[in-house]
Amino acid sequence: MATPNPALAGYISCWAGCGSSRTGKPGGASSMQQDLLETCDFKRAKRERRPPNMQAYNRRITDKPTRPRRAVASSETAREINRDILLHAIHLHQPVSRADLARLTGLQPSTVSVIIGKLIDEGWVLPGTLGRLPRGRRPTFVTLNDRHVMLAIDLRPGRANLAVVDINGRFLGRDTVPFEINAGSAVDEAKTAIARIAQAAHSLKAAFGDRAFQGLGVSVSGRVDQKTQRLLFSPNVPWGQIDVHEELQRVLEAPIEMENAANACLFSERWFGDFHDASNMLVVSVSEGIGTGMLVDGNVVRGRDDMAGEFGHMTLEESGPMCGCGNAGCWEVFASNRAGLRYYHELAPESKLTNFQELLKLALAGDLRALRSIDKMMTYLARGLSILAVGLAPEVIIIVGDCTALWPRIRPLLESQLIAKSITPRTPSLVAAMDGDAARLRGAAALVLHKVLFGQTDFATQTVRGSARAISKAVPLPA
Ligand SMILES: [Zn+2]
């Protein structure tokens, strides 16, 4: 594949984004070659019309970390930590000069130059325009190389949203694949739906053939075993017929990072969002059900069997309606999109509304019954949020979901409950993510980015901690 930038000459055009682009150069270390051999077996298997060697790939991603464990602080460990800090700083302040990076991070200018040189060699960072200063040498500004993109898939009940997202979180292309799968659907029907999603993914990838695809991320409403990537618990997503991860990987011929949508949004907020330094953060995803992602003391809380976060299934009222999980009166049967729609039908029995998007349209147009239905849904959402806020003490709660289209109306309602039920004078900030679809897609992209950029499937423990040092007055020259 032709590469416009010489720094990218080492890229190996593997859809899988297997990490080859990180080290970059053909003929690198032998372990690197082995990784490529294993990952690119997806392509070879396709040529030879046989299933890819998933065992080899799974061994690679589960047993062989892409970077040494950090229990012992070697000089290599320090370099890796500094590299991550610099990547975050470039992301936040780009275009930025090396001198300003040194000021922002507190690193020695020589250390910054060495690491930036390496990042440029690897192709993650691009040297940009020359800057100007009142005196002295003109600095060169660096930026992240937005040629790197991820394919993101958000699997929801009834539809899959797809997008190509670049390293800065920009959407380059989007598509939606509707499907009708329910708990009673046959295996073939589920496989057909996955095949249609794969077709749309291939079309999107082909439309951006000049970009460097780093891999595929999938966010899903349900809990995902982080070792096997199997969907463990998804009462609202009808994928019981097949192993979704395995089937997607088979038809897309690429390794995939799959994660619960709320957890994926945590990753997204940490890289693309405004909460780079938050250590205690809660993402509440409100859709057909309610899922939560929890960052506590800087760590994603996963719990036993990766099942932590299913607050949607905590019982609010024993006498409430039955839930898909088999219990009655769960939080999500009172506060999810489905509940909002049910409240509307109670007020307007003659209505033929079938989905929450139509209800939202009515509410945005000022329909009183639609607004009251969503108010009732938010009252229950607030009850659950106040329980979580008291128990987990987050700094910020991020609401992801279609309901945020009515944020000016629902925010005061949610906030007043959080304040009323708080046991301390400090209540968490309440923030709406951008539209629910975009947030979950960006989350899926962030899963891949964390893997290929930081070599981790969990948060880096180090971020730019808001250095008190002032940035210099250097400004980029106009193009
Ligand atoms: Zn339930």
Image: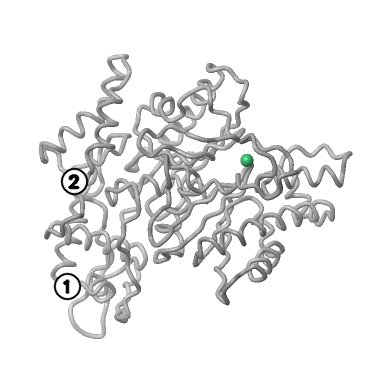
Give the camera-side residue of 92 and 334.
Answer: 334
Please provide percent x and percent y for residue 375.
75, 57
Asked whether mark 1 lies closer than 8 Å to ligand 1, one says no
Asked whether mark 2 lies closer than 8 Å to ligand 1, one says no
Q: Earlier in the sequence, mark 1 or mark 2?
A: 2
Q: Residue at x 65, y 67 (%)?
A: 421
Left/right placement of residue 259 relative to residue 348 reads: left
Give the camera-side residue of 59 and 466.
Answer: 59
- Identify the residue at the far bottom of this view: 134
Can I make out residue 357 in this image?
no
Quadrant of residue 130 in the image?
bottom left
The amino acid pointed to by label 2 is Thr
Secondary structure under tag 2 reads helix
Secondary structure under tag 1 reads helix
Contact flag, marks 1 and 2 (Cβ < 8 Å): no
Q: Residue at x 38, y 35 (%)?
A: 256
Q: Residue at x 17, y 72 (%)?
A: 109
Q: Which residue is mark 2?
A: 23
The amino acid pointed to by label 1 is Pro
Quadrant of residue 474 in the image?
bottom left
Give the camera-side residue of 442 and 414.
Answer: 414
- Check disc 1: other Cα within 10 Å, few if <14, some if 14-19, many if 20+: some
- Check disc 2: other Cα within 10 Å, few if <14, some if 14-19, many if 20+: some
Q: Which residue is mark 1?
A: 109
- Identify the residue at the far top of this view: 49
Please provide percent x and percent y for residue 68.
18, 49
Q: Residue at x 51, y 42 (%)?
A: 174
Please provide percent x and percent y for residue 106.
23, 74
Can I make out residue 278 in this image?
yes
Measured Cα–Cα span from mark 1 to mark 2: 23 Å
Quadrant observed for ligand 1 in the rendered image: top right
